[in-house]
Each structure stands twice: as C-alpha cells, then as structure tokens.
Image (tube, rainbow, N blue to C red):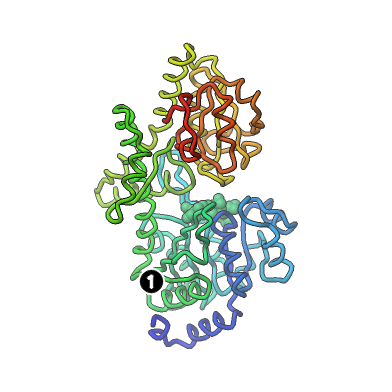
Amino acid sequence: MLQSAVSTPRAQSAFDRIADRSFRVGIIGLGYVGLPLVRTFARNGFTCVGFDIDPGKVEKLNSGVSYIRHLDASVFSEFIEDGRFTPTTEFSRIDALDACIICVPTPLNRYREPDLSSVVQTCESIAKHLRPGQLVVLESTTYPGTITDVVQPILQRGGLRAGSDFYLAFSPEREDPGNESFETATIPKVVGADDAESLALAAALYKEVVSRVVPVSTAATAEAVKITENIFRAVNIALVNELKVIYAAMNIDVWEVIEAAKTKPFGYMAFYPGPGLGGHCIPIDPFYLTWKAREYGLHTRFIELAGEINTRMPNYVVERLIEAIDRRLGKGLSGSAILLIGIAFKKNVDDMRESPSLKLIALIEARGGRVDYHDPFIEVTPPTREYPHFAGRRSVALSPRTIASYDAVLIATDHDGIDYAGIIDHAQIVIDTRNACARAGLASPKIVKA
Ligand SMILES: NC(=O)c1ccc[n+]([C@@H]2O[C@H](COP(=O)([O-])OP(=O)(O)OC[C@H]3O[C@@H](n4cnc5c(N)ncnc54)[C@H](O)[C@@H]3O)[C@@H](O)[C@H]2O)c1
C-alpha cells in the first residue's frame, strides 16, 4: 500500500533492487544492535557492509571471533567468506551503498544530558559520501526531533534534500539480548519518516527481513514510540521497587504478590523488582525525553520519580545487607567479606553497562567491606564509564569452601546455571535481590530477600 503511493523512477528502481537483493545495505555501529541486524539482512540474501570506528572489533570479526557472547562468531565468518558481510573501518565505502542504517551509542554525558556525539560523527561521515537515491535510517534510541533537528541538517550540508534527493527515516531497534523467544527478525519494526517516499522505501526494506513493519506518520512519532516503551519499563520497575520496600516493612513478599497478581487475565502486566536499573537503555533513554521536554517548559515528573526510586535501590540492598550481617553475625560491614553473584546487568548476558552490581560494590567498599564476584559470563571486569578502577577484577570460582569463606553472598544477577542450592548450603547469609532462590524452589532461613 505504502509502495503504491510512490511513483518516481528512482524509488521504483530501489524497490526492484530490494526485491532482487542487489540493494546494498550498510550498517554503522557493530554492537549489540548492529550485529544482529547484519545477521538478519545477510540471512535474507542482502550484501552488507558493517562499519565501526573500533578497529579491534572489525579485526575480531574478520578473524572469526565474536565479542558478544550470545552472537555466534561462525555465522558472521560464513557471511564474510561468501561475501555477504564485509566489516570495515573505511567509511569511504558508503559511496557504494544504497542504504546506511545507523546503530551507534546514544549515552548521557556527565551532566545526564543526551550525548549525540556518535550520531553526529556518523552523520558527518555519511554526509561526505551521500549521493542521490540513498536511504539513511537512524535506529539508535533518542529524543523526538533528532532526525529533523540533528540528522537531517548534517546530511543536507552538501546540498542534497531529504525526501527529494535522498531518503531519511527513523526505525527504533527493539533488541532484547539474552531473550531466546525473540530475535530481530521476529520483533515487529516501527518505521517513521517525514515524507511518503522515505517511509515507503524504509518500510519496503525492513519488510523483506522482519515479520511485521508498523509504519507511523513521522520520524518524531517513531522516535517517541521507542522512548515511550523504555519509559514504560522504567516507571513500572520503579513502582514494584517501591512496593518491595513497603511490603518488606509489612513482612509481605512482593514476589509472591506479583506471582498472584499476574494470574489476573487482563489489566495487569508483571514487572519485577531488583537491585536497580542496568543496561544501555532503561536507566538512560527516559532522560533524553526529560532533556527535550525542558525546551517546551515541561517537566517529566514520572520519569524523575522513577529515576529517584530506581537509583536508590542499591542503597536499599546494602542497608538490608548491613542489617543481616549485624543481626546474624553480630558484626559490621566494615571488615566483612561479601561474595557478589552476577556482575552483568541482567541474566545470561555478558553486558555490564550501567550494571547495578557496580554500584553495590562501590557502596559496600565505601563502608569498608571487601567484595569479590562470581559471574560465568564475565571472567574479567572491563573498564566501565563510571567505575574504570574496577577493571581487571576476576570472577572467583564457586566451591563450598570459597562460599563458606564469605560473611554473606549477595545475589545481584540471577544467571541460569548457578548452583543456588550449593550457595544456600554453604553460605552464612544469602541476600537475594532477584528472588532467584525461591524461583529455584529453594527456601532457607539464611535467605534475606532485598
Ligand atoms: N543493546 C540493546 O539491547 C539495545 C536495544 C534497543 C536499542 N538500543 C539502542 O541502539 C543503539 C546502539 O546500542 P548498542 O547496544 O548496539 O551499542 P554498542 O555499544 O553495543 O554498539 C555500538 C557500536 O558503535 C560503534 N561506534 C561508536 N561510535 C561510532 C561511530 N561514530 N561510527 C561508527 N561506529 C561507532 C562502537 O564502537 C560500537 O561497536 C543505542 O542508541 C541504544 O540505545 C540498544
């Protein structure tokens, strides 16, 4: 339907080349979002060039090594060998492409304001090589207005106009690393653009590789869709985190409440409390809207409140830990040894960006405690933005003797495959922030839920 609204010969030729797979796709930013996207396009017969500014990543891909644990390196090696995928740092190769899909990071700066430097740098690289007929799609999460206020002006610097000379769209990524029920191809894809041809072309391209495309009327609407999804999560997680604290004071188990509440077949959706927010999205993206809303003299009160509650969660967990050590062992946190289980920000991934475990370690060590960690997904701690000094710490192996040598075990991330029964058997105290023990059918007076 979208396609039938378009009549220019240039657009028609692009549709034909999408259909016969001669349409060449460039993916910029080969991380958690970009690499699965390469895999999806290559699997569907497209030739992809993948760009990254990190030569180490490009080298690894070229030598058959994956730097993201849940993405199998052999898949990419196969695509590289048969010419369907070329990883590179040479941005001049943009010249030869029909589409550039941007998947670079969108973090916050030290003042918690949007840091669009990677998007800007990428657009500047594209602008140098942009030619008529090319399609540019931004997938990075950002505030509504980024396409019109930031991306489009940079791309138009050379004189080409979006909508008439080249095509421009926004299509948010909805990747959920570690979730085995969904992958890029099976997650519906929202696409928005400010002109009919850009929308039709971007939708036609994605339609070839994902199960369903959801077109929306403008690029800003598509930007708002993604940020709404992430705000929804941040606010609902804050709600259950607040309820956890209140119910704990009443001696009610919030996880039991949620399990029962979710049996209601309508009007309720389960979210789970934890030690705080982590990852590249939920702790960060809502504040993109907060920043943008200020331009309109508006305040994002739900977002701020959710941020306040979620940010305090590691402090709450440490308070519970201190209380438990004091009551049960008659000692203070200072001089105590704590074994933290799970340094990744969520289960079964090797990603520790913004992980609340790092804040837990910092808080415990600031009080004079000593922390070691066990994480089967992260052998050695890499440098992180906020805690570069934690880099180089190594995961300790779990054994009955090791477990027993700590004053308390703190479960921060509920990876599968951890021997929770063994932990309970040998630990003195188990602080469980994820309800991991109960979910494994384990109960013990040693467990303190926090
Ligand atoms: N990780 C997720 O689950 C997820 C889910 C949905 C949306 N997103 C969004 O997708 C975007 C990318 O996230 P990610 O998790 O893939 O990040 P990532 O850090 O895993 O990957 C980004 C890649 O871009 C590269 N890069 C940085 N600047 C560049 C530049 N100027 N030119 C080329 N490459 C550059 C980096 O080296 C890195 O390899 C972000 O906006 C994020 O919010 C992420």
Residue at point 58%, 21% (across, down): 406
- Helix, strand or loop at mark 1: strand
- Tell me where residue 179 appears, x and y as whole percent: 51, 54
Residue at the far left in the pictured view: 297
Q: Residue at x 49, y 29 (%)?
A: 360
Task: Answer left or right for 90 relative to 290.
Answer: right
Identify which residue, 107 or 21, lies in the foreground. Answer: 21
Above or below, 92 against 398 in this view is: below
In the rendered image, residue 431, in percent from the top left (x then y), is placed at 47, 28
Q: Where does residue 268 sit, x and y in percent of width and height?
A: 30, 51
- Quadrant that contains the N terminus: bottom left
Q: Residue furthest top?
A: 330
Q: Give the number of callouts.
A: 1
| Quadrant (top left/top right/bottom left/bottom right) for the C terminus | top left
Mark 1: amino acid: Pro
Image coords of residue 255 (percent x, y): 38, 39
Res 46 visible: yes
Residue on which the image places disc 1: 215
Q: Is residue 390 visible?
A: no
Please give the name of the residue rendered at 39% of the width and 28% of the height, measured from the top-left corner: 316
* Quarter holding residue 284: top left
